[in-house]
Amino acid sequence: MQYDAIVIGAGFAGLYALHRLRDEMGLSVRAFDGAGGVGGTWWYNRYPGARVDAPSAPFYGYTFSKELVDEWEWTETQSASADVLAYVDHVADRFDLRKDIQFDTRVTDARWDEATQRWSIETAHGDEASARFLICATGALFVANKPHYPGIDDFAGPVYHTGRWPHEPVSFEGKRVGVIGTGSSGVQAIPEIAKTAEHVTVFQRTAQYALPARNRPLTAEQLQEYRDNWADLRDSMYRRGGWPFPTTRLKAWDHTPEERQARYEEMWAEGGLHLAINSYVGVLADEELNAEVGDFVRAKIGQIVDDPETARKLTPDYLFGTKRLILDNGYFETYNRSNVSLVDLRDDPITAFTATSVQTEHGEHPIDMLVLATGFDAVSGSMLQLNPQGRGGVRLGEKWAARFDTYLGMAIAGFPNLFMIHGPQSPGVLYTMPLGGERHMAWIDACIRHLDENDMGTVEATEEAEAAWDQEVNDLANRTLYPRTNSWYTGANIPGKPRQFLAHTMGSRYFDRIEEIAADGFRGFVFERSSSSIPG
């Protein structure tokens, strides 16, 4: 089958891409997804306690339709995964998107044909299709990372990865559960698992700065207020890093130490990400201020956790906020339960598994079930899993062997007419992802229209533009403290992955930049005439 565009992925970004390309641009489009339904990462991440790990309702959603805002009833400030899935199901039905999505169909190959100026794809079922444009909405947090601990396959009990959770209920009643990992999914899942399990042994790889979410119900009055003020709130989201909340302009060193502590207490009580973004300017750039905020959170952990040794193990020692900040709903309090114990793998590493236990350097821990909350090959992993073939037969895996070079986080030199949403070197995970997907697609829309209006067949980033963009992303990252910590932001969680900060840190100003580039005739791109208009 031949189409104008093929979309890979049916999560937030893929659904909007399909809607924009088909309903607003009038193109023929086919979307493919290996999942059995819409939702992308959310379709897979159904583990206990899974929630949007940022201030969400009603802002973790689409902004393109005021009618959609008016008709959807969000129930909590921090939406649970089931609510997010219900929302995207509603969107898919409301805009009749399912008829152009092929579910349970993983795209296994994509190849560029220089003669026809088209992308050809193959699926795991043997289907073939081609299109002028390939839109990769493959997900920044999609490729599950399973660690290679010695003997892990010797464990005979059930093993669940939070990023590939079963769709049928999993009971922990009367079970001894081992959980490896305390990133966002682990922090969310552990308190829920502990409510019914006989015992939970947490194997901590890294202590985390988790901030209280202060999740609460949304009232009808709050929802109506959001709807009444939606135009202003949407404008604020565009200007303020993807959220409508103003960030502080307070400078820490204008206040006394006592005033700063009072400010931190206020932000802690407010919950969410306010301590990081609304206490003082420069928390993620000023090392002295960062240390003070980090000390504040570390002290809070010591106050919450009853056992001093457990509190010590749970206390992070890296720069505050330089790993992904986590919003929790009672995570630290969970360690005060008698059925929860903590093993710090930095001091007591895993040495082996048996059929019924995890063995560490200092002991053996009997378990009946194992939960891997071990994260993802983030940002670049899904594109490398696809591994498309561009000009000259070059695979993306070859091009990205040493570095993830892109232009604008959306285009790749040598891969014409291929666009990524939330690709490496875009704001991606540092921005509100549904809104970021909308803004990327608006830019892709303008680029495709530019091609058609000028009878061009291909658009492709130049290597010079890639190099300049790489320098810009690095320079911006180095103005922050992010690169000084090993994290999945830098690829440090995946053995052998190139070490590189994977996100553009400027949020809304990034989108201003790409709009300027479009207005300047899509500076940094080269165009090729349509093969159908070339004589002979």
Image: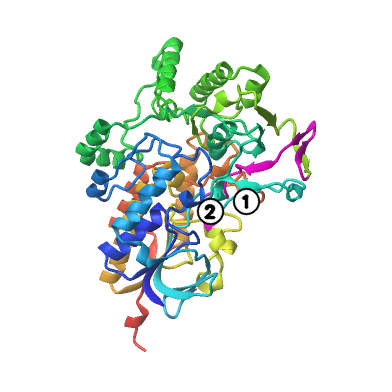
The residue tagged 2 is 380
Q: Residues within 10 Å of mark 2 (few under 14, many from 20)?
A: many
Quarter occupied by residue 199: top right
Q: Residue furthest bottom?
A: 536
Q: Mark 1 near mark 2, Cβ–Cβ under 8 Å?
A: yes
Cα–Cα gap, marks 1 and 2:
10 Å
The residue nearer to you, when weighing 2 against 71, is 71
Where residue 463 appears, as percent x and y from the top left, is 48, 61
Q: Residue at x 39, y 59 (%)?
A: 524
Secondary structure state at the residue bearing disc 1:
loop
The residue nearer to you, when weighing 276 against 23, is 23
Where residue 470 appears, as percent x and y from the top left, is 48, 51
Q: Quadrant of the N terminus?
A: bottom left
- The amino acid marked with disc number 2 is Ser
Q: Residue at x 57, y 48 (%)?
A: 376
What range is drawn magenta here? 355-382
The residue tagged 1 is 497
The residue nearer to you, when weighing 211 against 324, is 211
Instruction: Choose the circle earlier in sequence order: 1 or 2.
Output: 2
